[in-house]
């Protein structure tokens, strides 16, 4: 079983406006092509759509905005490695990076949460996305992606790279659904996420390649050797991490 996620078509950037760094866009579709957006992000709000189309681009999402990948007029995906998407103030977004050309450029450590930099199985990520507290949908590239979740019901589909899906804030009873790709993926549950109950369902988990990293004592986690981990939270509730058929082994669960 794999979880379905909404995706958006790639956008030919020659057919849409290309706002300069620091611009604010509330409607329509635009392409992020100004490399200066790395330090002066384009703000995209309302129901607008932004297509990433330059290395090191940075975009801030508000409202119910969406992100997809940009192409040239021949349909070739444009490089967007090192891009940062900040949807932390949005209401619920769709981030559709599948098919994106991340290339070799990586996100600087200064743009990543410290816990990812210090504890990730792989430390070089080509894109970083921080999702909203609403209900989000995310699909990644086939390069190395990092995504940080906030409260809400989120559906995540990773690509073929070595990806990390992190939860650092309270889940507040939210439900997370992950489909992991063919790379060496890491699901990181920080201590901030252990403040309330929640449910995490994982499809296509590989106990030989993928890792669940939990910022808790081993005594707080039950179920290793089965397909369901039960993590005791700070308020006495439980976070369940459920695999769709693959048991979690000692090798695939890491305590940080």
Image (cartoon, helix red, strand yellow):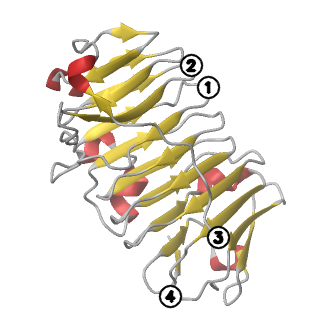
Q: Which mark is residue 1?
A: 3
Mark 2 touches mark 1? (CB < 8 Å): yes
Cα–Cα span, label 1 and label 3: 28 Å
Front-most of 173 and 7?
Answer: 7
In the image, residue 215 above or below residue 253: above
Cα–Cα span, label 2 and label 4: 41 Å
- Mark 2 surroundings within 10 Å by alpha-carbon count, few (fewer than 14), some (14 through 19), many (20 or more): some
Cα–Cα span, label 3 and label 4: 23 Å
Please state the horizontal and vertical placement of residue 7, each as a whole percent of the image: 50, 42
- Mark 4 surroundings within 10 Å by alpha-carbon count, few (fewer than 14), some (14 through 19), many (20 or more): few
In the image, residue 78 above or below residue 254: above
Q: Which mark is residue 251?
A: 4
For the view shown, which residue lies furthest in the front direction?
74
- Mark 3 surroundings within 10 Å by alpha-carbon count, few (fewer than 14), some (14 through 19), many (20 or more): few
Label 1: which residue?
A: 91
Cα–Cα span, label 2 and label 1: 5 Å
Q: Quadrant location of the N terminus?
A: bottom right
In the image, residue 256 above or below residue 118: below
Query: Residue 142, located in which quarter of the rendered image?
Result: bottom left
Cα–Cα span, label 4 and label 1: 37 Å
Label 2: which residue?
A: 63
**What residue appears at the point 52 percent right and 36 percent down from the top-left corner?**
94
236 vs 20, left or right, is right
């Amino acid at each position: 079983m794999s979880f379905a996620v909404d995706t958006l078509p790639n956008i030919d950037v020659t057919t849409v406006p290309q706002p300069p760094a620091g611009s604010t866009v509330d409607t329509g579709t635009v392409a992020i092509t100004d490399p200066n957006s790395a330090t002066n992000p384009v703000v995209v709000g309302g129901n607008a759509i932004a297509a990433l189309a330059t290395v090191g681009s940075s975009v801030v999402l508000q409202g119910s905005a969406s992100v997809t990948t940009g192409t040239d007029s021949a349909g070739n995906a444009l490089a967007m490695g090192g891009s940062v998407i900040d949807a932390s103030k949005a209401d619920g977004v769709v981030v559709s990076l599948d098919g994106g050309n991340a290339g070799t450029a990586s996100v600087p450590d200064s743009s990543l949460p410290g816990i990812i930099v210090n504890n990730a199985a792989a430390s070089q990520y080509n894109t970083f996305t921080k999702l909203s507290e609403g209900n989000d949908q995310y699909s990644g590239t086939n390069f190395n992606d990092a995504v940080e979740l906030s409260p809400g019901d989120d559906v995540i589909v990773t690509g073929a790279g070595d990806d990390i899906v992190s939860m650092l804030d309270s889940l507040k009873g939210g439900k997370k659904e992950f489909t992991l790709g063919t790379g060496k993926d890491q699901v990181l549950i920080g201590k901030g996420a252990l403040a309330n109950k929640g449910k995490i369902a994982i499809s296509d988990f590989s106990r030989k390649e993928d890792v669940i990293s939990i910022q808790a004592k081993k005594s707080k986690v039950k179920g290793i050797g089965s397909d369901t981990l039960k993590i005791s939270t700070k308020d006495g509730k439980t976070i369940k991490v459920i695999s769709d058929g693959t048991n979690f082994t000692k090798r695939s669960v890491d305590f940080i």
